[in-house]
Image (spheres, rainbow, N blue to C red):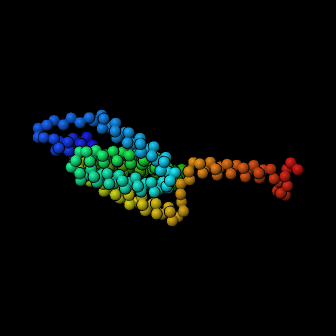
Amino acid sequence: MWTPAMTTLSKKELPRGSEVVLPFGLIFSTFMVCCMAGSSMFSIFIERMKVETIGCYVISIATLAFAVMTLSESATVVFVAFNAFEICVGLYFPMMGTMKSSIVPEDKRTAIYNIYRVPLNFIVVSSLLTDLTPSRAFSICTGMLAIASALQMSLTAHRSTSGHQVVSTDEESAVAKVTDNNSLQLEMVDPMGTDKEN
């Protein structure tokens, strides 16, 4: 939807009858760089805050970005909002992958992930069949992201009160080492509490 949105706004800012020629390749490349930057930023944020908290910030900022796309009449402002949203997209994938790995049981992941795709495909097909204008599509996305933001905040509050948290890779390695050391010590001691070597 960004192509017709940027084209329409650029036409409004140019004199009547002027032809709009946007560097779509450069714009798309900028989006991809922002997405890559977001993915790199996740490794920095995860060291300072919980993954659920990162999710609250990411989805909230994405909601604001889409709200700006819906309301703004400036092509430059909308372009900046698109870049902000792409950064959120880059943050979203590692954030959601980390969070799902701690919430969804491993033996049920395939079934649950397939169920997730049903509403996703329904939304995509509906948007294609209804031929929405960019402003209406952005309005709907803003509403859905606002709901997602509220649900993410609810999840964060629930996991904070229940004491659940995602264990980092370093912490898992440390726990594994302690467990291995304890197992070795137990093997060296007989049931009477004396060393086997003695």
The answer to whether residue 21 is above or below residue 1 is above
Query: Number of marks in the image?
Result: 0
Query: Residue 67: horizontal and vertical position, in percent?
Result: 28, 54
Picture residue at 62% right of the left edge, 48% below the top: 173
Image point (88%, 50%), residue name: 198
Which residue is located at x 34 percent, y 39 percent? 30
- Say which quarter of the image contains residue 9: top left
x, y (%) of residue 24? 27, 36
Q: Residue furthest right?
A: 198
Residue 78 on image: x %, y %: 27, 47
Q: Left or right: where does residue 56 sit relative to residue 194?
A: left
Tell me if residue 125 can be seen: no
Where residue 13 appears, x then y in whole percent? Answer: 17, 44
Q: Is residue 160 above or below residue 59?
A: below
Q: Is residue 42 left or right of residue 80?
A: right
Q: Nearer the viewer, residue 127 or 67?
A: 67
Residue shown at the point (85%, 55%) measured from the top left: 194
Quarter-of-image position of residue 154: bottom left
Give the side of residue 172 with respect to residue 133, left or right: right
Quadrant into which the N terminus falls? top left
Residue furthest to the left in view is 16
Q: Report whether 154 appears left or right of 136.
A: right
- Residue 154 seen in the figure: yes
